[in-house]
Amino acid sequence: MEQSIFSEISVIVAIGAGIAAVMYALRQPLIISYIITGILVGPSVFNIVKSQDTIETFANIGIVLLLFIVGLGLNPRFIKEIGKAAVLTGLGQVLITMGVGYLIARNFVDSNVEAIYVSTALAFSSTIIVLKLLNDKKEQSRLYGKIAIGFLLVQDILATIALLISAASGDGSGLAKGDLMFLGFKGLVLTVFLISASIRVLPALMPFVSKSQEFLFLFSVAWGLGIAALTAELGFSLEVGALFAGVTLASLPYAQEVASRLRPLRDFFIVLFFISLGAHLGIDNFGSVLPVALLLSAFVLIGNPIIVMFIMGMLGYTKKTSFKAGLAVAQISEFSLILVILGNRYGQVSNETIALVTIIALVTIAISTYMIIYSEKLYKVIEKYLKLFERKKIRYEQSPHSKFKVILFGYKKGGIEFIRLFKNLHHRFVIVDYDPDVIDQLEHQNQHYVFGDATDVELLNEIGVGESNVVASVITDFYTNKFLVEHIHGINPKAVIISRAENAKEARELYSLGASYVMLPHYLSAERIMAFIKKNGFKKSQFNKLRQKHLEYLENNKQELEPSR
């Protein structure tokens, strides 16, 4: 049995890799290839998927990891920043979409109940797909991204309630007022627990946990999966629990390090989620409902973004922010499929309606993926038509503060001098270190810091080394410095890169990789390089002259400076 499950997943992943290779060569979004893979391996085509429960379990792990990582990037302050917009936009869009969707669907389905199911399915958008695309574009921290995440979370809560109502009405018990009140009470208790943990327990626990990379990784996975499982047991969705689990850790100095280490794990499991989603998309009864499905798909693709743009415009946001946030609701959700399948189980929804919602899911997920990926180009094409959705007094997006123009790697053995220099020159800087004791020290000094590994590419991208002006490293490990110099010079050749080496051979290699200046104990001390910077600033031209002078010195004193063998 175990061997058959292993073989099954291996075949599915191999097929997915083959289709992804074709899509990648055609420069198409890989999400589409995963969903196509799911359809092919599902019961409608090759029927390879036999262990559906196992694959769905893996898919749920992918969902939890994705939402957990997103939560790690959302400091609790973001709730204050976009809370009102998220709640009003989320509620408003769902109610308006349900109302208009019902009026349209009532003309094409057999009963009022089915029309309600269809209109409800149209109202919910896919949190997983949108967050995956935002993460790929690295725009989850942009204003529109944060608002989209906020109202998608509101949608998830409403979708949970819709599923409860469907289940209760289907088995004839009805959903009593007390059930909703009890659900709200459980939500309140859970919120209090998470807030208490984030304020009192986790800050005291994490310095101990972070002393071991493996323990930090294991603890983070356990926390994310555990809170998600707890919320699911309490009657909420996994998505809500995973996101809040991440938010509770977001304000701690270890959040970025945790997120960067979890991303490879997330990427594998989230692929299985999309394959599992595709496997649920049967292609039976397509012909009879195709025209109606295309009409309702057009409503989701065009109508839902317009509803969001209208609401956000009334709240004072720019047309660009409103437009890009609006694209987040241009597809229907996996909740929508679950909802109609549940309705079919209770005899309230026909097979034709399931086929209808399935086509809408396929069409809207595929097209909205392109819309979100190419949102900037799409906005430029239709910008002049969007003035209707912008008020005279508007809220401009503030410049993101997560990127620093000056970055220092390491703190001990020279870091203090650099910090003093940066302060004297009034440069805004951030310190990257992997020592928990150093992090505690920096926190007490109110310094900007990031806990993480200097060789982690994801972390380097997060802190913006590609846009930095100055990068300095006082790290003593040569291979770490070699990686940093090569990577930063490759993506940001205009940056001034200061590194350190222990001997002339290491210095020459770092220079060959693009270092602007390499500190050597016998040539220029940290104090003297500080004096040079104070006099010349961080002008690349001046560093090039110093670099050439140092290279000549190393060449002329080659025999004396070579490390002893």
Image (cartoon, rainbow, N blue to C red):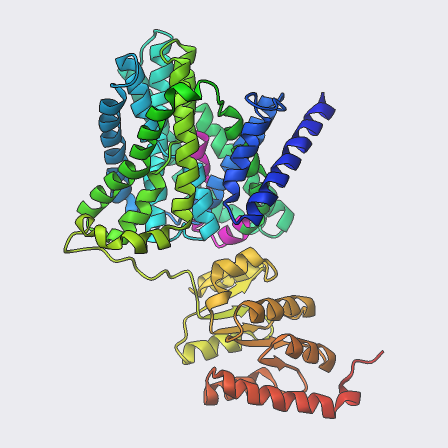
Whether residue 35 is situated above or below residue 342 in the rendered picture: below
Residue at x 25%, y 19% (from the top left corner): 107
Give the overall secondary structure of the magenta segment.
helix
Residue at x 22%, y 28% (from the top left corner): 100
- Decide which of 438, 151 is in the foreground and name it: 151
Residue 298 falls left or right of residue 35: left
Residue at x 31%, y 53% (from the top left corner): 379
* Identity of the residue furthest to the top in this view: 172
Residue 314 visible within the image:
yes
Residue 54 falls left or right of residue 439: right
Whether residue 171 is situated above or below residue 505 in the rendered picture: above
- Decide which of 320, 260 is in the foreground and name it: 320
Q: Which residues are magenta?
A: 237-259
Residue 546 occupies quadrant: bottom right
Residue 485 falls left or right of residue 71: right
Tell me the quarter of the image containing the N terminus. Answer: top right
Residue at x 23%, y 45% (from the top left corner): 312
